[in-house]
Amino acid sequence: MAWRLHLANQAIQRLDILDNLLAIWKKPNQLTYYDLHTGVLQHEQTLSPPKVESWQDDAWQIFLAEFTAPNKLYLPTLTLDHQTVYLSEDGLLRLYQDDTLQLENDGQYHHLDVADPIAVGLDRFLGLVAVIDTERKLHIFQQQIKIGVFDLPFTQAEYFRPMLTVANGGTAIYVTDGQQIALIDSSGKVKKQIKTYYDIRHMTCSPDGNHLITSDMDSGVIRLYQGHDLTLTHQRFAIDLVAEATQVQLMADMPPIFVALSALTIDNHANIAFSMSGVICVTDLSHLDQLPRPQVLL
């Protein structure tokens, strides 16, 4: 399975794999859904979030209750003008991020004590919340209960581009400063840390945490790591993946060779979706180059 399409003339904002559907965010309020395996258009959606003074407003609650894809799965993230909303798989737990963090859990609202959150991740299954603040601290909550505040295992270099992603069940928290990756468990313990030797543009994990995928700032290489030990196992230039994918349109342009990826995601089956400018490509692990692994000589 590998297909591509030229969808827009501007960069795609986000991609989400929802079972058999690929959700493509062309704009913060415009969604297009394609069949993940065939590239066939399934649905188009324009969001109209109500402007409310409180998250408890009935109009807002009705809107979020219906914030689902055509297959009835809840979308993971909603970006508004000055807030980002993260949703659990059942849609009942919502995390609101602006200058502060507020967790809505079964109708109850809880302030999460983090000053100036700059990177946020939500375990969509059990509700673990991981946050990096401007002081380079990692805050971990189990829903509204604070587990602790931990120093990030990175040197205090001037270059600091924090990102994090959380596996379902809180089994793994992956954090990066842009040049290193650390695997941290739900108690804040660093299990593994590597230096990438490239600048990270995107980093995300599969929901089960078995795969961690990155793209770089310069060369357009997609790299795949084993989630449990951060071993690099596969990689390939994104433009090569686009070139060999089946074109699902009669007429379509290729993206510029050296353009950086604008979105990247992976599911539990190692299906990979990414965008270069306005071109979408869906591929899988079999199309990446497998790297040799050192083995003990017998």
Image (cartoon, rainbow, N blue to C red):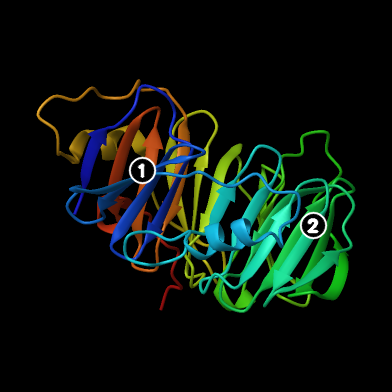
Q: Which residue is mark 1?
A: 236
51 left or right of 41 in image: right
In what element is the residue under mark 1? Answer: strand
How far apart marks 2 and 1 lie (CA) works out to 37 Å
Residue at which label 2 appears: 101
Q: Amino acid at mark 1?
A: Arg
- Give the quadrant of the C terminus: bottom left
Residue 174 position in % (x across, y down): 64, 61
Towards the viewer: 297 or 133? 133
In this picture, residue 226 sits left or right of residue 50: left
Q: Which image quarter is the N terminus in? A: bottom left
Q: Residue 74: x percent and y percent?
A: 46, 64
Instruction: Give the label, 2 or 1, closer to the camera.
Output: 2
How many neighbours does mark 2 have within 10 angstroms: few (below 14), some (14-19), or many (20 or more)? many
Q: Earlier in the sequence, mark 2 or mark 1?
A: 2
Image x and y of residue 287, in percent: 25, 51
